[in-house]
Amino acid sequence: MYCGECGSRMLVTYSTSHTGVVYPYFMCAGRHRKRNEKNGCQLKSFLIADAEYQMEKIYDCISFTPEERVLIETHLKDYISQEQEKYKTEVDRLRRQKVKIERKQEKLLETYYNDAIPLQLMKKQQQALSKELAAVESEIAMHTATFEEIIAELTEIMDTFENCGETYREATGKLKRLMNQAIFDQVLVTKEGQLEPQPNSLCEGIFKAKHYITKSTPTEVDADSIRKLFKSGSKFFEQGLNNDCLVEHTGFEPVTSTMRM
């Protein structure tokens, strides 16, 4: 979590009441470092419990109902089926191109062995063909991800978003951390103490798809959002291992300060 005013991380601080009750707060690290400066960050500290409440409301907003999930998943799978046919056509074209290049290489060698071209020219042309072949093979590799894997990843992502508001409320600190990491690049705090989560590109694409499908009922799904889903699906789960976490095992934010206020 970061301060939306100065970009500093938020620290965890503690305030003890006269009755001995300890209240955990968020404080801007930039304000703490420059608290004696006139032009320092002015973001006020606020209760972690308030931040937790806001995050719960945010998850309620991005949560899919079972009905929405079925509608979205059906549209996405239909789109995937259409793309699968396009991919097959494209892969066939690339494989034919690969065969042509390999035949050119063979003919070039035969020409050289028949003393029809000098060695240097043969090497130069072979290098050019090798680069062309490598580019084609790279494209083939990019197109060979199985659509069964894509469907499986889509199902996992839909599992994450279906009723995620309820899931977040009942989750342990560790699971909340993983959910926040997987969905958001970062969470900013405004000067009014409001949380503004910044979803990663994949999740932003899914939210757009949800809007188009459930609100606008278009004839076509947002193609750009689906392409992001294809290319970034596996990264959705890899982000759960990112060190820039939002929630530590013991709470909403890693304890980076234990000052008494």
Image: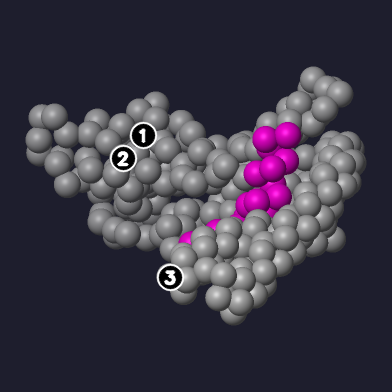
- Amino acid at pointer 1: Gly
In the rendered image, residue 49 lying in the magenta stretch gets the answer no
Tell me which amino acid carries mark 3.
Gln
Q: Which residue is mark 1?
A: 4
Q: Is residue 244 left or right of residue 210?
A: left
| 2 or 3: tag closer to the N-terminus | 2
Identify whether 183 is placed above or below 259: above
Q: Position of residue 32 (x, y in %)?
A: 21, 45
**What kind of secondary structure does the magenta stretch mostly adopt?**
helix
**Farthest residue, direction front:** 115
Q: Earlier in the sequence, mark 1 or mark 3?
A: 1
Judging from the image, what secondary structure is the residue with disc 1 in? Answer: loop
Asked if the residues shown at circle 2 and circle 1 are in contact, with their CB atoms under 8 angstroms apart, the answer is yes
Which mark is on residue 7? Answer: 2
From the top left corner, tell me how far across and down residue 40 is, in percent.
Answer: 17, 34
Q: Nearer the viewer, residue 208 or 22?
A: 208
Secondary structure category for the residue under label 2: loop
Q: What residue is disc 3 on?
A: 120
Q: Residue at x 57, y 62 (%)?
A: 129
**Which residue is more in the foreground, 38 or 18?**
38
Start-end of magenta stretch: 223-242
